[in-house]
Image (spheres, helix red, strand yellow):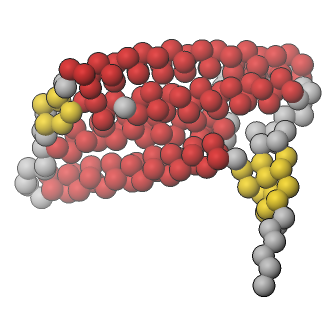
């Protein structure tokens, strides 16, 4: 038997069609995977905090590590899900102002928004990387309910902000190539 898979690439849309089904590029898979991990972390935080509340309600002392690991989870799911949320158009916008603009002005504001978002993400990436490397080199430990190295906790900041930089860049180039009012998310 012969297996033949027909693949058509559409680089301007950032997708490929394989046997008629839409396939996104590998970066989309990465940020979707990061978003799924963020969702799992959010579920885990919800579960451990609920369990701690039940234990406290029953008159026992909840585990001492619940607050500490919830804080780490909040940091991680924020940076894991940021690029996916940006791609989906879920970041905060000032719609009351933007919707009052004409299409060309709105397009320009969205381009400026992507440029500013890229710059801020690069700054967070740069300082997050410097801080994470410093934590690794100095071997700094977090001493709370449990003792852990700070390096792996803060590693998500440069990784997540790098994904955010890439997504802002993708949106910028997509908007530059498109006509005002004809962009899809």
In this picture, is 113 found above or below 13? above
In this picture, is 121 found above or below 71? above
Q: In the image, 117: left or right of 106?
A: left
Q: In the image, 67: left or right of 181?
A: left
Q: In the image, 75: left or right of 36?
A: left
Label count reads: 0
**Quarter of the image holding residue 55?**
bottom left
**Quarter of the image holding residue 163?**
top right
Q: Position of residue 88 (x, y in %)?
A: 67, 41
Inspect this view and state whether residue 57 appears.
no
Quadrant that contains the N terminus: bottom right
Residue toward you, 61 or 65: 65
Q: Position of residue 165 (x, y in %)?
A: 59, 26
Q: Kindly give the residue lying farthest to the bottom in the view shown.
A: 1
Q: Position of residue 70 (x, y in %)?
A: 29, 41
Q: Kindly give the residue lying farthest to the front in the view shown.
A: 1
Q: Residue at x 78, y 48 (%)?
A: 15
Q: Residue at x 64, y 32 (%)?
A: 167
Q: Residue at x 7, y 54 (%)?
A: 60
Quadrant that contains the C terminus: top right
**Quarter of the image holding residue 171?**
top right
Inspect this view and state whether residue 171 appears.
yes
Q: Kindly give the residue lying farthest to the left in the view shown.
A: 60
Q: Position of residue 106 (x, y in %)?
A: 82, 20
Q: Kindly give the residue lying farthest to the right in the view shown.
A: 179
Residue toward you, 8 or 167: 8
Q: Residue at x 90, y 19 (%)?
A: 104
């Amino acid at each position: 038997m012969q297996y033949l898979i027909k693949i058509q690439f559409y680089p301007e849309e950032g997708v490929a069609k394989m046997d008629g089904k839409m396939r996104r590029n590998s970066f989309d898979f990465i940020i979707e995977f990061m978003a799924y991990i963020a969702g799992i972390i959010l579920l885990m935080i919800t579960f451990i905090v609920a369990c701690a509340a039940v234990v406290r309600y029953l008159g026992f002392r909840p585990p001492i590590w619940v607050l500490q690991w919830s804080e780490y989870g909040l940091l991680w799911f924020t940076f894991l899900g940021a690029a996916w949320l940006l791609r989906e158009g879920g970041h905060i916008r000032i719609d009351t102002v933007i919707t009052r603009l004409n299409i060309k002005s709105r397009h320009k504001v969205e381009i400026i928004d992507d440029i500013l978002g890229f710059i801020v993400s690069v700054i967070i990436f740069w300082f997050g990387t410097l801080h994470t490397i410093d934590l690794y080199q100095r071997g700094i430990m977090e001493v709370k309910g449990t003792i852990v190295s700070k390096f792996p906790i803060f590693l998500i900041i440069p990784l997540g902000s790098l994904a955010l930089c890439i997504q802002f860049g993708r949106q910028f180039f997509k908007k530059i190539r498109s006509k005002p009012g004809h962009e899809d998310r």
